[in-house]
Image: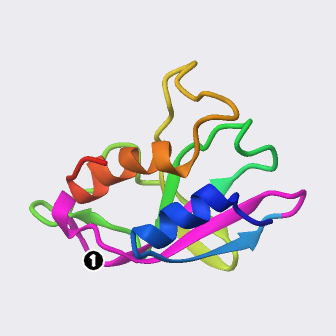
Amino acid sequence: MQLPEDDQHFLNAHGYSWTVLPDGAQAGFLIVKGFDVSGGGFGPSPTDLMVRIPAQYNMAQLDMWYCDPPIRYVANSQFAPASEVTEQHMNRMWQRFSRHLVSGAWRPGVDNLRSFMPLIWRELQGRRG
């Protein structure tokens, strides 16, 4: 699987070290290496960030994200709400951040990583897109 050019330009413009690994049936895993989460009050930082890319992307929406190593709030060593579950992907254990867009929020054929990443930035880095 290969990301659309717009997504590749977006990731490169933000200076991310990234790759896409296959997940069978034309789906994939976007891995962003060394994603800084310290601005959101998490540690350890950095972590690897993973976003599953569905086979019908961008007609199909992005949903949830994952971290390895697992991250917790530095202030109290607690997991963020709905991030306690781990899943195995690509021979690694990934902490799942169960976050879902409001029904109808994804605009098929329009939305992409540029519109999805601000959700991750707000939570994990404490910044706006």
x 64%, y 38%: residue: 61
Q: Residue 27, image x and y in percent?
A: 79, 57
x 20%, y 53%: residue: 126
Q: Is residue 117 visible?
A: yes
Q: Secondary structure at mark 1?
A: loop
> In which quadrant is the N terminus drawn?
bottom right
Residue 27 falls left or right of residue 122 = right
Q: Amino acid at mark 1?
A: Ser
In-front residue for pair 96/18 = 18
In-front residue for pair 83/16 = 16
- The correct choice, above or below, for 123 with respect to 72 in the image is above
Residue 33 falls left or right of residue 29 = left
Q: Disc 1 marks which residue?
A: 45
Q: Is residue 33 magenta?
A: yes
- The correct choice, above or below, for 115 with respect to 77 in the image is above
Residue lying farthest to the right in this orientation: 25
Image: magenta residue range? 24-51
Q: Is residue 109 magenta?
A: no
In-front residue for pair 112/69 = 112
x 70%, y 42%: residue: 58
Q: Residue 111, image x and y in percent?
A: 58, 37
Q: Is residue 49 visible?
A: no
